Image (cartoon, helix red, strand yellow):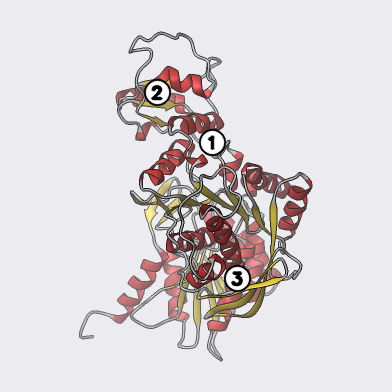
Amino acid sequence: MKLQELLHETGIKCGGTTENREENPQIGGICCDSRRVEQGDLFVCIRGSLDDGSRHIAEAQKRGAAAVLVSADGLPPTTALLSRLSACFYRHPDQRLCLIGVTGTNGKTTTTGLIHQVLAGLGAGCGLLGTVVYDTGLRRSEAGRTTPPPDQLYRMLSEMEQAENVACAMEVSSHGLALGRVAGMAFAWGAFTNLTEDHLDFHKTMEAYYQAKKKMFYQVTNTSFINIDDPWGRRLYRELQSEGYSCCSVSLNDSTADIFGQVEEAGAAGSRMQLYRSGRPATELSLLLPGSFNCYNGLLAWAVSTAACEALAGSASSTGIEKRALRRPREGFDIAAARLLAQASGAAGRFQPVENPRGKLVIVDYAHTPDALENVLRAARPLVKPGGRLICVFGCGGDRDANKRPLMGAAAGQLADYSIITSDNPRTEPQERIASQIEEGMCQCCGAYEIESDRRRAIARALALCGPCDAVLIAGKGHETTQTIGRKKYPFDDRQVVQELLKEADGPPGD
């Protein structure tokens, strides 16, 4: 696409309309990171919280940028403008894909992963974008951010089309919404998991956090599925309804909800529930994923998946979505989706048991909010054998919301038998200060604990304490493979560390 055409279609005014090749070059891509610029790209200078793209113009030009976009007043373009440019350059793939946006504090990764597995299992090629992995069908890579910048995001959506996918399950973060990374993007379906305290270092208040999340639902072209058992979800449902947006209530507690799941069994081995749609029995749903919190993830995934598949099969209204030749299963989408969910696996680092040579029960989870830590501790409790203890290793990230630290300490103090407070990603904040704030909550409920700032030594200590009847929960980092200390990232994977420590404890062969 020619530069002038791109700018004209995006509504950007610039000096000159000449067809001179130097002033109207062919643009091969859009990029806002000078380190990623390729020959022929348009480099868009964006100012972030830590850097200003205009400082890297020379590097972008050296790497082959065909043009550089800065504003006339010297201020950098906004991320929302980058989103418009990217959407235009890639010819709006969001309007052709069945794009499913999932937002909330906890459960986004598991819910999108389940939706991805169901749609793929039913023959609807489906991409995946989230905290753990980006999978376009052409390539699979470790995720950098939950919601990437628009230039990367639209490029990956375009790749999904090239791979003949018809859908994408996508986590949408509050940062991505507040900063305009998904500005103008068309979501066919939306889902809301819950809202609990997190990211207040960025949003400052829960109200601002909520309003950031709410933005996504104004961009949903069909129906949004909302967990109304969550108080913020109940508010969201009422407000969207009053504003004329199509939304569907989802609940495990309210039998009058549009989608109701009556839990009949929920434990360490998974769960089983009877599903109702508009008060009528729909099907039974079993999940291999443990914990009552996964009942919500599974219920939302079932509700969204069946609606999306009905639309893709052309048997339901699908505004904004081209009808696709998705074959309808003989049993119907309700039952087929439940059957696939019964076989579905959880996301990496989400309540993930760690296989080890000593046979110790060790679970790694990404829980890094008070609500998430409480949920996983409750889910881990049934795994403890009679007479055993639940040992929790956790910390809190530095340079982030400090308000949640004593709340997480209180959750661990109340629900674990013994806790080891350690580092998470301390970043540039003193670890001693982080630990002392966690300790405040721990002391309020008289929890038993110790502090070991070195995460590897903390895990080693927990494993040494772990007896044959005990269980160890290592929380906070989950799938992450690095630890950020200062401004540097160091290799660190909780799962790998557990295996290494227990292998070392076995000693060399022959001992």
| In this rendering, the label closer to the viewer, 2 or 1 | 2
Disc 1 secondary structure class:
loop
At 41% from the left edge and 40% from the top edge, which residue is drawn?
Answer: 158
Residue 86 placement (x, y as % from top left): 46, 32
Q: Quadrant of the C terminus?
A: bottom left
Q: Is residue 12 left or right of residue 247?
A: left
- Residue 295's mark? 3
Amino acid at pointer 2: Ile
Residue 1 placement (x, y as % from top left): 38, 24
Check disc 1 and report the residue beneath it: 49
Q: What separation in Å lies between label 3 and label 1 (alpha carbons)?
A: 37 Å
Residue 121: name its quadrant. bottom left
- Whichever of labels 2 and 1 marks the residue nearer the N terminus, that label is 1
Disc 2 secondary structure class:
helix
Residue 394 drawn above or below residue 389:
above
- Badge 3 crowding class, 10 Å Cα cut-off, few under 14, some 14 to 19, many 20 or more, is many
Q: What separation in Å lies between label 2 and label 3 (alpha carbons)?
A: 49 Å
